[in-house]
Image (cartoon, rainbow, N blue to C red):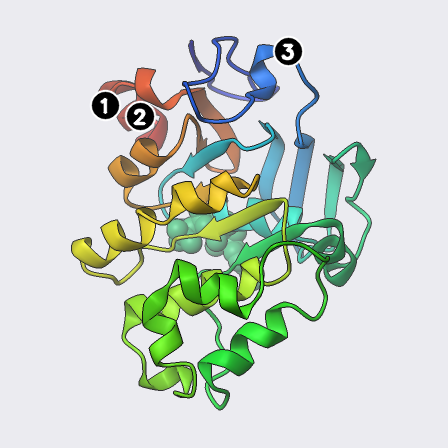
Amino acid sequence: MVSAVDASPPPPLPSSPPAAGRGTSPASGEEKPLLSVKGLDAFYGDLQALFGVDIAVGVGEVIAVIGANGAGKSTLLKSIAGLIASKRGSIAFAGERIETLPAHKIVAHGIALVPEGRRLFPSLSVEENLVIGGQLGRPGPWSLERVFRLFPDLRERREFKSTALSGGQQQMVAIGRALMSNPRLLLCDEISLGLAPIVVREIYARLPEIVAEGISVVIVEQDIEQALRAASRAYCLQEGRVALAGNASELTREAVSAAYFGT
Ligand code: ATP
């Protein structure tokens, strides 16, 4: 089911069952969501960037957050990751309220952010960048060896400075660094930005392997088609509000375009 919304309050979550093999949608009502964001307002000084945003992510689910430049997608991910101090509303993760926790405690709870622009440490090697990712996290299946199995290109280049890598390889390091913290929820901010389509496809081809480890994923993308292919459900933000929410396979180009541009 697709729901179009023009203003606050935010829309109810869609009520259709999840796509096969794509985790347990909280919209099904069968299970509590892993992540539940309710009535989220976020601010940069006097500027309000999010207005009453509601989203939910089920265990093992992949959801997409799409929207035009400045719609608030990165602010939503940063708010969940504890990087926006000025906010209102509730963020519950695995049954615990986390909206007042600092970023390092949120990582320890099992949420990892792959930031827009990768933000690697340029003076450090691939391996050192990855090891840093594991320092604040939890115990679990992800290790250097496991990341190198996911991205074999990185094994061969483990001693290289991150600046010596291609854009796609740098993005693999950024994802690998986040996985090293053994998250239950991976937040990916525009991982396709600046990459050739073939490289984007190569990186997205690894997503099922990540999800198979029981990780839920939120994808923020400017490549809408890629995002909708990878996700079972999607939310479209417009000027800081959820303008559309629904199963990815049911969102029509027209509905997305209207929610995107407010036409
Ligand atoms: P993009 O695709 O361009 O990254 P976005 O959907 O991720 O866009 P945000 O980066 O979350 O959007 O921005 C939401 C709003 O908050 C915009 O109006 C933006 O100008 C503003 N904003 C973002 N970061 C800051 C900041 N550090 N200081 C002040 N305003 C900011």
Q: Quadrant of the N terminus?
A: top left
Query: What residue is rendered at 47% in x and 33% in y?
Result: 63
User: Dot 3: few (<14), some (14–19), or many (≥20) neighbours within 10 Å?
Assistant: few
On screen, residue 9 above or below 112: above
Q: Are marks 1 and 3 in contact (CB under 8 Å)?
A: no
Q: Are marks 1 and 2 in contact (CB under 8 Å)?
A: yes
Q: Judging from the image, what secondary structure is the residue with disc 1 in?
A: helix
* Type of the residue with mark 1: Arg
Label 1 – label 3 distance at C-alpha: 27 Å
Disc 2 designates what residue? 256
User: Dot 2: few (<14), some (14–19), or many (≥20) neighbours within 10 Å?
Assistant: many
Nearest the eye: 130 or 195: 130
Disc 3 designates what residue? 29
Q: Judging from the image, what secondary structure is the residue with disc 2 in?
A: helix
On screen, residue 188 above or below 8: below
Left or right side of 89 for 71 = left
On screen, residue 162 above or below 35: below
* Type of the residue with mark 2: Val
